[in-house]
Each structure stands twice: as structure tokens, then as C-alpha cells.
Amino acid sequence: MTGYFSSPFPRRASVGVDVGGVIVGGGAPVVVQSMTNTDTADVDQTVAQVAALHRAGSEIVRITVDRDESAAAVPAIRDRLARLGINVPLVGDFHYIGHKLLADHPACAEALAKYRINPGNVGFKDKKDRQFAAIVEMAIKYDKPVRIGVNWGSLDQELLTRLMDENQAQGFPLTAQEVTREAIVQSAILSAEMAEEIGLGRDKIILSAKVSGVQDLIAVYTELATRSNHALHLGLTEAGMGTKGIVASSAAMGILLQQGIGDT
């Protein structure tokens, strides 16, 4: 059979990012990654789960780094995995105090292959930009890429409020849902621009913008794909457990990937 189904959309062009030897974007095959649900401070359990995820096909694994004990455990996790012959890149998922943890635990900063930053919970008010910049500067120091991961549940409220106010002043305002989508896209793009202004190369930046609705996710990533050439990390947040979560994630990912959008 010829026609539409035999001619998929061309893959969106993006800047490739090296994550611990795994290339994300830049025309490389779509990378599969996952996240542990262990207490990262528990080295044994975290190593076991990372190993299991790697055996199941995960090419990159994200771990939570939320406190000193977790940060201190990262080098031991990395070393234990290496002794097992597992060289899967580890990504540190930071919230609120990532700037402090990276500064206080240089071995952790070195052992991680990538840092994940959420612009919505990196800090508040005047601290937000300073703490975001501090993490970016650590990424530059250790030559690590970052994922700027916007999440609708922790969206930058200052940005959202400003866009809502601007929208109300228009003669034909957008819906609240449409404004929220725009705020998510702007948060990702503006944060990437800030990171580049600080000195982080575009080949060190991956973007994500996770929402919980399938249609919202498709709309947000379509906009991101149009307005930037950063590598894109796909994911549906709060998709749910069991069949519901599998169906929702599969539907969203399938549509975006068929359109050539998404690098991991």
C-alpha cells in the first residue's frame, strides 16, 4: 500500500546533545529513558532498579536528587553500576535546592551525566533566576548537559499571571487553557535563552514541557517544535497507573513521533 501511511512525516531537525555518550537529537534514533522510584540514598535498591531498567531497554535513567543523602549516594551508585558493567548515563532530577546540592557535592555533580532543572520550582521571586543560573554554571563547570523540564503542575506563576493579564486586555481573549499552554512553551524557551546567555551551548540543552492531557501535550510540543530547534524530551505527566496510563502515554507519544517530533 502506498500513500500517506508509507510516507511518514520527516524527522524534525534538532541540535544533538551528548548525554554520557548517548546522543539525543541531531538525527540520532529516538532514545528510550526511564526514572527510578527508589530512595536514591538507598544505594542497593537504586542500583538494582537502574540495572533492571537498563536490561529492559532504558538507555538513560533518571534518579531523584532531593537532599544531601541522595547527592552523597550518587557516586557510589555510579561506581557500583560500572563494576556491574552497566554504563547507562544517570540524570539527576533536582527540585528547589539543586544549586546547593551540586555545589556541596562535587562528586555527585561529576558522576551525573545530565542535570534536570524545572524552572517552576528552582526558586521563588528574586531567588529564581540566581538559583537557575547557579545550576547552569555548574553544568558549564562540569561540562554537563541540562534538561529544562517545564511541568504544568509547577508552572512559573509570575509568567502565567502576566500572560493571563495580557490576554484579558485583548478584544478576543484566548481561553485559560490556551494561555496556560502558551505559558508552558514560553517558560521552556525563555529558560533556554537564559541558559545560553549564561554561557551554556545549545548542544547542551534539552527541553521538555509535560502536561497531563493528551491533546494539551500534542499542542504544546507542536509549538515547541515549531519555535525552537532544541532536542525535545517527550513525556506525559500524571498519566495514571495501569491501562489508563499506558493508553494515554502511547496515544500522545505515537502522534508526536509520527509527526517527527521528539528525540527521547
Image (cartoon, rainbow, N blue to C red):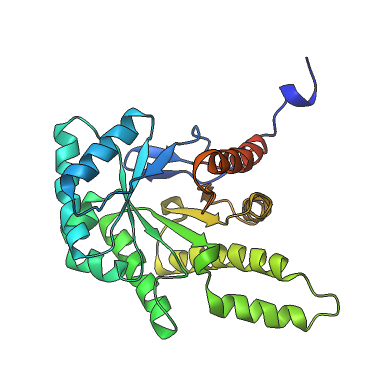
Is residue 148 positioned above or below 27 on the image? below
| Number of numbered labels in the structure image | 0
Is residue 144 positioned above or below 34 on the image? below
In the image, residue 212 lies at what x, y percent?
58, 55
Q: On the rendered structure, is 205 left or right of 171? A: left
- Residue pictured at 33% horizontal, 46% vertical: 36
In the image, residue 233 lies at what x, y percent?
50, 48
Q: On the rendered structure, is 214 left or right of 90? A: right
Q: On the rendered structure, is 22 left or right of 197? A: left
Query: Where is the N terminus found, in terms of image quarters?
Result: top right
- Residue pictured at 16% horizontal, 50% vertical: 75
Nearer to the camera, 116 or 36: 36
Is residue 147 positioned above or below 52 on the image? below
Residue lying furthest top: 1
In the image, residue 214 lies at what x, y percent?
64, 49
Nearer to the camera, 2 or 229: 2
In the image, residue 131 lies at what x, y percent?
35, 74
Nearer to the camera, 111 or 94: 94
- Residue pictured at 42% horizontal, 85% vertical: 126
Asked where in the image residue 158 lies, by quadrant, the reply is bottom right
Is residue 239 positioned above or below 68 on the image? above
- Residue pictured at 52% horizontal, 65% vertical: 153
